[in-house]
């Protein structure tokens, strides 16, 4: 039961808004020490447990380096930003008269979810697509319609640009049969003596995928209405 | 480990290591950043991990991670690499037109082409190592280098521009850049300590699971809640499925295991949308997009996602109840 203290550390850390890196390390050490603790444990035992936990953390940290490799992409993105990529994205979308923030993000949602459903999960992503293209395009669509944006709406639009990338990815990828989560489900069931085909699992992911698309379509429509309500009156007021 | 073709994670780690080393050194030279020594140490430690991690041993890597936490906890500064002005960018955007999108699209195009080539051609596996299933990542890094090369030849910026521009963006992400890797490591420690089994025991003991509907609700909500705490549905899945999914839903009530597994995982994904623990999805973009509330527990990205996540969680409960028990 004591090993659950680590989860408590995580929750407490977020409540206290401590630096998440510190929280993660503290949670790891707490968990390792708690797992080793008994009323008879002396300092020597606890020291050994601490070292073992730090080693386990270090091994996992080294094995998971590939997670942080993605930052290399910033070389290309930064170089293009320097040459005006974001400005171009904004200008290009401003020319499309029918473009609204909601419709633009909806198109990206469809592309992202559709691409993920056929296994192309790396076609999107926040460093590669959202920061350089999707967010500036969404802002551009709003600026073309309503003029200069107040901070509140600007950050709201950016948040929605990031959200669309996540939602499209999460509820598209499980339709693909060779994605990590499907393989994890299959592997776990197999360990417990239940054999299912990956295709079966991915078929049962489709109803949720459609529901997610419907719900978020409605959300984006509501976003457009909200922007219309808060910004249209403001720009009219400025014009008169 | 071979350093010739086919390209593998070993090459990717060298590229990453050299990249972070360059960012580290350029940070130290940036006099505008009062905390430049911290930035130097942080990216330098990460570069060491990439270049020499395999030789440091488990404890050595653990101490290195501890160093990253210490430096990140004290706090990084933000450099001001020389870049173009807003006017210059607008002028450049006008002059170069939509061709500017091309190098950006090279990256996903090559990632896609590489992945497909490894799977479906004879020559693909000779260029990119098909094992262990990280070929997309290898192709992504290759695509990035090609895109940088194309942009350098076409745009003719100063030679250090790709590194300096990357440093500008990386400084805006800050210590959050390694949070996803740290959380993955925490997950590994949780597994070693048996945290999952304990949560399973608690759940089995204190949550009423008398009817199909109650058990479905407990399983789906449990998946979402545990994912919120762990930041990862993959960590929650084995725990909740061993505690409720298999023994109650499948064995006791005879639910279809494929539905329970598939929809259960997606219920967990609803939790991912609502937690700052899912750093790479919810915290990193807030930093990349310069959101003012990026360090809040519920930042703008999470607030934009909750109104989709909650109804979708309810929808998953209904779908599982209907589809797993058709009779």
Image: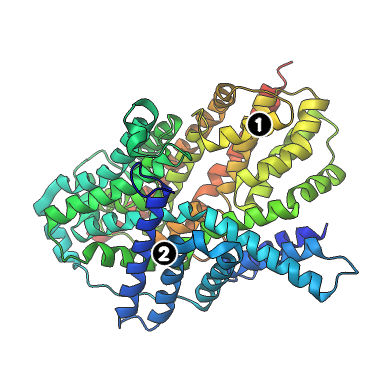
Front-most of residues B117 and B235: B117
Front-most of residues B70 and A16: B70
Q: Are marks 2 and 1 in contact (CB under 8 Å)?
A: no
Q: Indicate the position of residue A40 as horizontal and vertical percent values.
A: 90, 69
On residue B261, which mark appears? Answer: 1
On residue B173, which mark appears? Answer: 2
Compared across the picture, whether B179 is left or right of B209 comes to: left
> Mark 2 and mark 1: span between their CA atoms?
35 Å
In the picture as drawn, the residue positioned furthest to the left comes out as B95
**Mark 2 vs mark 1: same chain?**
yes
Compared across the picture, whether B317 is left or right of B182 comes to: right
- Which residue corresponds to the image point at 70% horizontal and 17% vertical from the top-left? B326
**Residue B298: in sight, yes or no?**
no
Chain designation of label 2: B
**Residue A238: in sight, yes or no?**
yes
Chain designation of label 1: B
Mark 1 residue element: helix
The correct choice, above or below, for B135 with respect to A209 in the image is: below
**Which callout, 2 or 1, points at the residue further toward the start of the chain?**
2
Q: Indicate the position of residue B324 as horizontal and vertical percent values.
A: 69, 23
Front-most of residues A7 and B49: B49
Q: Would you call the spot at circle 1 few (<14 residues within 10 Å), some (14-19), or many (20 or more)?
A: many
Compared across the picture, whether B312 is left or right of B103 comes to: right
The correct choice, above or below, for A192 with respect to A73 in the image is: above
Q: Indicate the position of residue A120 as horizontal and vertical percent values.
A: 40, 35
- Which residue corresponds to the image point at 23% horizontal and 45% vertical from the top-left? A93
């Amino acid at each position: 039961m004591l090993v659950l203290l680590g989860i408590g550390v995580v929750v407490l850390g977020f409540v206290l808004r401590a630096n998440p890196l510190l929280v993660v390390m503290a949670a790891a050490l707490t968990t390792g020490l708690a797992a080793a603790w008994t009323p008879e444990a002396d300092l020597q035992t606890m020291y050994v447990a601490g070292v073992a936990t730090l080693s386990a953390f270090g091994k996992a940290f080294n094995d998971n380096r590939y997670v942080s490799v993605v930052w290399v992409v910033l070389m290309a993105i930064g170089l293009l930003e320097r040459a005006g990529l974001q400005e171009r994205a904004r200008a290009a979308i401003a020319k499309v008269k029918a473009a609204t923030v909601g419709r633009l993000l909806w198109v990206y949602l469809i592309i992202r979810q559709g691409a993920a459903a056929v296994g192309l999960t790396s076609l999107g992503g926040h460093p590669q697509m959202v920061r350089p293209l999707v967010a500036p395009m969404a802002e551009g669509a709003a600026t073309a319609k309503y003029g200069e944006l107040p901070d509140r709406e600007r950050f709201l639009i950016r948040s929605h640009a990031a959200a669309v990338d996540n939602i499209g990815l999460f509820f598209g990828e499980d339709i693909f049969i060779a994605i990590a989560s499907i393989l994890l489900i299959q592997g776990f069931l197999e360990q417990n003596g239940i054999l299912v085909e990956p295709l079966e699992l991915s078929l049962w992911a489709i109803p949720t995928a459609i529901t997610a698309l419907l719900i978020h379509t409605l959300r984006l429509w509501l976003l457009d209405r909200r922007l219309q309500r808060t910004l249209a009156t403001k720009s009219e007021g400025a014009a008169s | 480990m071979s350093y010739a073709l086919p390209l593998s994670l070993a090459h990717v780690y060298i590229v990453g290591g050299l990249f972070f080393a360059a960012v580290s050194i350029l940070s130290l030279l940036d006099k505008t950043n009062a905390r430049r020594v911290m930035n130097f140490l942080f990216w330098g430690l990460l570069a060491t991990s990439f270049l020499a991690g395999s030789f440091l041993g488990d404890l050595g890597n653990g101490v290195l991670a501890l160093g990253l936490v210490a430096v990140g906890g004290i706090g990084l500064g933000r450099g001001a690499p020389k870049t173009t002005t807003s006017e210059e960018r607008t002028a450049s955007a006008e002059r170069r037109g939509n061709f500017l999108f091309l190098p950006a699209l090279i990256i996903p195009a090559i990632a896609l082409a590489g992945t497909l080539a490894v799977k479906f051609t004879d020559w693909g596996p000779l260029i990119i190592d098909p094992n262990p299933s990280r070929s997309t990542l290898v192709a992504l890094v290759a695509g990035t280098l090609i895109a940088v090369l194309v942009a350098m030849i076409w745009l003719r910026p100063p030679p250090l521009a790709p590194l300096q521009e990357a440093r500008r963006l990386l400084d805006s992400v800050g210590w959050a850049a390694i949070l996803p890797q740290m959380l993955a490591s925490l997950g590994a420690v949780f597994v070693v300590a048996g945290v999952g089994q304990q949560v399973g025991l608690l759940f089995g003991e204190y949550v009423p699971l008398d009817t199909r509907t109650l058990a479905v609700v407990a399983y789906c909500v449990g998946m979402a809640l545990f994912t919120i705490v762990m930041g990862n549905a993959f960590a929650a899945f084995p725990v909740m499925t061993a505690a409720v999914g298999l023994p109650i839903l499948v064995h006791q009530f005879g639910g279809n295991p494929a539905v329970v597994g598939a929809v259960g995982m997606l219920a967990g994904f609803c939790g991912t949308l609502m937690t700052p623990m899912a750093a790479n999805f919810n915290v990193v973009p807030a930093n990349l997009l310069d959101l003012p509330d990026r360090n809040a527990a519920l930042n703008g990205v999470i607030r934009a996602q909750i109104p989709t996540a909650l109804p979708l969680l309810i929808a998953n409960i209904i779908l599982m109840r209907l589809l797993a028990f058709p009779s």
